[in-house]
Amino acid sequence: MIERLKIIRANGFYPYRNQAIERALLDGCEKGEMILYLWQNDKTVFIGKNQNAFTECRAQALFEDGGYVARRFTGGGAVYHDKGNLNFTFIAPREDYSLENQFSILSDALRSLGFEATLSGRNDVLIDGKKISGNAFYQSGKNCLHHGTVLISSDREAIAKYLTVSRVKLSAKGVKSVQSRVANLCDFRSGVNAELVAAALTDAFSARYPGAEKIFLGEDDLSSEEIGRLTAHFADRTYILGDDVKYSVSFERRYEWGVADVRLEMKGDVIEKARIYSDALDVDAVAEKERLLTGTDVKAPADGRVKDIIETITGEIGNEI
Amino acid sequence: MKILFSKSHEWAAIEGKTARVGISDHAQKELGDLVFVNLPEVGAEVKAGEVLCDVESVKAVSDLYAPVSGKVVAVNDELEGAPELINRDAMKAWICEIEVSEVPSDLMDEEGYQKFIKG
């Protein structure tokens, strides 16, 4: 029995903190409670729990544009978030969790704004055959979670730019491109924004459980220590990219010994291959730096002679992306 | 060898000091087609009733719980490339092997478990 509804809206747009809040709400959800969490991320490719960041998105291009890659703890495929997208999360103890109810809340909310939406398969919500919401799910023995996107005025060019969609998967379904099968609410009716959708979802949520007490929470009601710890977890590079994923790092820096154009092939934290192009006169010394870098774990470098380069690498890729 | 089931739908086939662990056919059906199995780490100490690992199906990511306490001594790597083996034969597709330190008293035998799921 749902006795209490908790509604919370995230203040910021930093994806890892928003994920941390979601996780804390999931872990803290008590018997008799149902939570609706509304949140928005700035420029983020949000990959599924078991996806490879580098095959799903153009991570480098995204980083260069100041975006983020984040990993969900729910399954499914990669989606793109920006401020033109609103995320909703339903959290409930296993016995009160009902996908049917939750999808009804979404369609009720959209209907109140003048949109007729239909559920397609398990994950997608469509308007006129185009996807405006993608959904994903998590269940533990105690609590379950259902979250999804609502595309309102998201940058569709960015979706095409950052998400790499396997050609095989699309052609197998007979669909041309991601861009042509997703739509924004604003494509159907102008004047819709995240505030309106958030309010409509909140109203539909309380209308669905009329007898329940309604409690509005703020971020301050959550443990800042827990949110801090979880934010670091979701922002951790190894968590997002995997510990054996290969990627490349390149940068140009002026060091005491010369200007260096450094290109590295990384596998997790380990430099697999290093190439340095430099104007330094001591060619052998540069070659030695390449040799010293190769095989080095940037989190635990053994040799102090390439300390300056390692510092740039950890600064470049850091713990946070 | 005896096969026992947990209320969270895992099985443990216990032989001497080790138990092979998997999920029940009922759990497999509830989850739907599996697309990914995150195996536990060999060497990990696990406690009965606590999260052992997780699986992703077409429906959701779901946590699996350790039916017995002990240390993970082996994992079934085959599942990494072929999670569908669990759908095909859940009682055969073991996930890991645990060196058992404790078997909880609330585990059920096959008959008890069948009653429990019909509940």
Image (cartoon, rainbow, N blue to C red):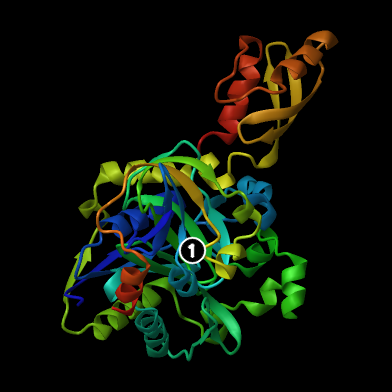
What percent of the width, then of the height, locates residue A98?
A: 35, 78
Instruction: Give the side of residue A210 with respect to residue A151, left or right.
Output: left
Quick one: B41 or A89, which is closer to the camera? B41
Give the side of residue A205 with respect to residue A128, left or right. Answer: left
Q: Chain of mark 1?
A: A
B82 sits to left or right of B18 = right
Seen from the viewer's position, the closer of residues A279 and B52 is B52
Relative to A26, residue A273 above or below? above
Residue depicted at x 52% and y 73%: B32
Residue A294 appears in the figure:
yes
Instruction: Please give the name of the residue rendered at 35% of the width and 49% of the height, measured from the top-left corner.
Output: B68
Q: Residues within 10 Å of mark 1 (few under 14, many from 20)?
A: many
Residue A215's image quarter?
A: bottom left
Residue B47 location, x and y as percent?
33, 45
| Quadrant hosting residue A214 | bottom left
Residue A282 in view of the camera = no
Number of numbered discs overlaid on the protein picture: 1
Residue B8 placement (x, y as % from top left): 35, 63
Please provide percent x and percent y for residue A197.
39, 77
Q: Up-down: is A269 above or below A58?
A: above
User: In this picture, is A296 found above or below A84?
Assistant: above
Query: What residue is pinned by disc 1?
Result: A83
Residue B102 image-quadrant placement: top left
The kind of residue tagged 1 is Lys
Q: Quadrant where the C terminus of chain B lies? A: bottom left
Please, what secondary structure does the residue beneath circle 1 have?
loop
